[in-house]
Amino acid sequence: MPITANNINRKSWLEVPIESDFPIQNIPFGVFLTKENVVTVGTRIGDFAIDLGALQQLNYFDGIELTDDMFMQDTLNDFISDGNKTWRLVRNRIADIFDEKNPKLQDNIKHRDIVIFNINDVEMQLPVLIGDFTDFYSSKGYATNVGKMFRDPDNALLPNWLHIPMGYHGRSSTIIPSGIPVHRPMGQTLPMDEQTPVFGPSRLVDFELETAFITTDVNIMGENIPINEVEDYIFGMVLLNDWSARDIQKWEYIPLGPFLSKNFATSISPWIITMDALEPFKTKGCKQDPAPLPYLQIKGKSTYDINLEASIQPENSEATIVSKTNFKYMYWSMSQQLAHHTSNGCRVNSGDMMGSGTISGSTPDSFGSMLELTSGGKNPLKLNDGTERKFINDGDTVIIKGFCKNNGVRIGFGEVSSKLLPPFVRK
């Protein structure tokens, strides 16, 4: 089935600002709360949020097999479970409805008032009920930088890293949408030159610039999915900030890896950008040496050209861009990650989320964490307001943005933005 929604010549009758992340060729999916306190599944064009539940009730999806309440829910899980044929049919239909040449909704003022909202008049929600969250460790730049800091610089990568898409199972209960603040976590740390740990607020709170992909129902327990099929089970992508407490992490990560240093908060952007929308930006992945085992070998274009940046905005001041990188720098692709995830028969369900791991390029300005950008705090960054940062201060807002662009079409993710607050105090 062709992806007609991606037609680069298509224009919408809704006004779309120049350099908007959300032209009619994007058509992301999310969940929002209206001023009337109605939660609905929606999409976005320009600065307009579109109520897909209302569109369905008004029969704009006539001819597409959908359950009666498909878009009148508070998550996208059921829609994602319907599979890529339904995703493409719906996305193509939305593009047709809002095409400047289609008068059906354009000329129906009564329907438009029911369906279309200003983006500033809605409150974005977590788009899916996330059952399981896996965070990978798939950027060679990041893994090398961290390995040099914590281990022998000449042997930064452990022997298994070039053979396995490394990952760990995270905590889904503390995944939050953009705009929700995060409290500085409490935890155990080991002060320098001490033998006994102390309990208190983390002093080294960091961001990690990541993306994540959302899956549909992939397999039954015990079944592994061949790598040439896994793309069919990836619905779309979001931006992800995997908040990290580096001092807690340093004390706890041996022997089982991160625990409380990571599970206190993970922030994601609220709009899921479909793989169909990202298809024009597919590109060749990194050269892998040694060659992966056969079950991880992939041919052709395997990754996406997504520009990414991270900024720090102190309270009552302007933001400073501290990192610019690109998703194409990832060593292990999403297909390889998902194929490996199911290779032992692990069940993966609709709404599961897989984080990329910190995305770092080869130059200092492309590093995806403060741990790398400041060499563990040894070389503070100077912000535009003249202040310096070793890690993230209380009151700072971390903003991550991402977009693709070619042939005059820009497909963006919006942003994931979260403010760091002091430790939570019970009243």
Image (spheres, rainbow, N blue to C red):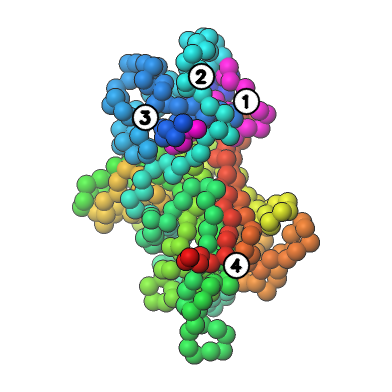
Q: Residue furthest right?
A: 386
**Closer mark to the observer between disc 4 and disc 1:** 1
Q: Secondary structure at mark 1?
A: loop
Magenta segment main secondary structure: loop
- Compare marks 2 and 3 and give the one earlier in the sequence: 3
Residue assigned mark 2:
113
In front: 166, or 251? 251
Q: Residue at x 46, y 51 (%)?
A: 176
Numbered label attached to residue 16:
1
Q: Residue furthest front?
A: 427
User: Residue 401: x, y in percent?
Assistant: 60, 46
User: Residue 251: x, y in percent?
Assistant: 47, 78
Considering only vertical position in the picture, is 17 above or below 151?
above
Q: Residue at x 74, y 59 (%)?
A: 383
Disc 2 to disc 4, C-alpha distance: 48 Å
Quarter of the image for residue 38 reads: top left
Disc 1 to disc 3, C-alpha distance: 24 Å
Residue assigned mark 4:
371
